[in-house]
Image: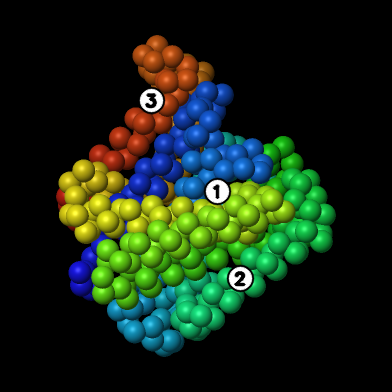
Amino acid sequence: MKTSKRYHALDVFRGMTIALMILVNTPGSWAYVYSPFRHAQWHGLTLTDLVFPFFLFIVGTALMFSFSKYNFCRTKEVYQKIAKRTAIIFLFGLLGHLYGTLVHGKAFENFRIMGVLQRIALCYGIAAVLVLRFKIQHLWIILIAVLIGYWQLLLWNSGYSLETNFARTVDIAILGASHLYKGTGIPFDPEGLLSTIPSIMTVLLGFFAGVMIHSATDQIDNVKKMLIMGALLILAGWAWSFVFPINKQLWTSPYVLVTGGIAFMTLAVLIWVIDINTMKKPFHAFEIFGTNSLFVYAASGVWTNTMLWLQVDNRSLYSFMYTDWFVPLAGNMNGSLLFALANVAVWWVILYLMYRKKIFIKI
């Protein structure tokens, strides 16, 4: 198999991640959500906790294929392009939060600075510079040093509790408590500044996967190597978790390794099924989701806030559709799931129409 070809498994993997993201972000009611579609409350891992690291992993894989076209040239233009894309993605994240603040009538002094798109921007920008500046063996050293260093920072500075963890302390000192996420009951940002550092390592793991795919002369053999790599990462993360818990909100080092390992294995299986055995048709729907991934993330967030803002019979449009359309059809729990699936379907139709018209919004 020629390494210059386009790997449809990468697009399918990205699309699966985006579809799952929409599904878990838009239940009909947060009071009725099946446990796999919730984040772990603190320590632990659920299906939903795989969405964000999978996306960052894919960002890293894409870096390999993007930069290889230019032989990893470290020109002024390349760095300017990285800086521009980082700034644009970060700005979109801020604008999304600003829209939510305005439509819900929240006080601007409580405007949240960090968020998912902001973290994606920082992870992309910093990881892009790292992969341009350092050789692959040095990147592995950086990854190991950062994961161990982050562990020690949290360990020796009040541990891993929600109230006293060092990541929260840093975010309060730099961003201010009023500008942090408050969904946990106290000011604490799961996409904060300090915890962004280990999340960059998730991007590097994706880059390593991209290197393996791009450089392999035998993809069947490479799939085996990726499965082994994934298993080793999961085993290492699991062993480490006995002294450093798996925690998505802190983006702990074992969380990086376990989710990275699962991503390695998932991508390996998809390559084997889709690109080696050419079973593309069953996965085409997911490939559609992968075509405008950042656009659909930002747009779906805006639409969700709009549904929560618009009023029907003294209720939000969001609540009205769930209680009047989906609960009578399937009950509270399944109606909530059906509402989420309907959102996935609607966005798929929008993305399909964009795909047919060759509208690809690149950031």
Would you say the residues marked 3 and 1 are in contact, meaning their CB atoms lie under 8 Å apart?
A: no
- State left or right for residue 325 relative to residue 286: right
Q: Earlier in the sequence, mark 2 or mark 1?
A: 1
Q: Nearer the viewer, residue 299 or 98?
A: 299
Q: Earlier in the sequence, mark 3 or mark 2?
A: 2
Secondary structure category for the residue under label 3 = helix
Residue on which disc 3 sits: 338
Q: Label 3 amino acid?
A: Leu
- State left or right for residue 281 relative to residue 334: left
In the image, what residue occupies the spot 27% across and 56% down? 272
Picture coordinates of residue 147, whole percent (x, y):
64, 65
Q: Residues within 10 Å of mark 2 (few under 14, many from 20)?
A: some
Q: Residues within 10 Å of mark 1 (few under 14, many from 20)?
A: some
In the image, what residue occupies the spot 64% across and 72% down? 145
Picture coordinates of residue 303, whole percent (x, y):
42, 39
Relative to 70, does residue 126 appear above or below in the rendering? Answer: above
Q: Label 2 amino acid?
A: Ile
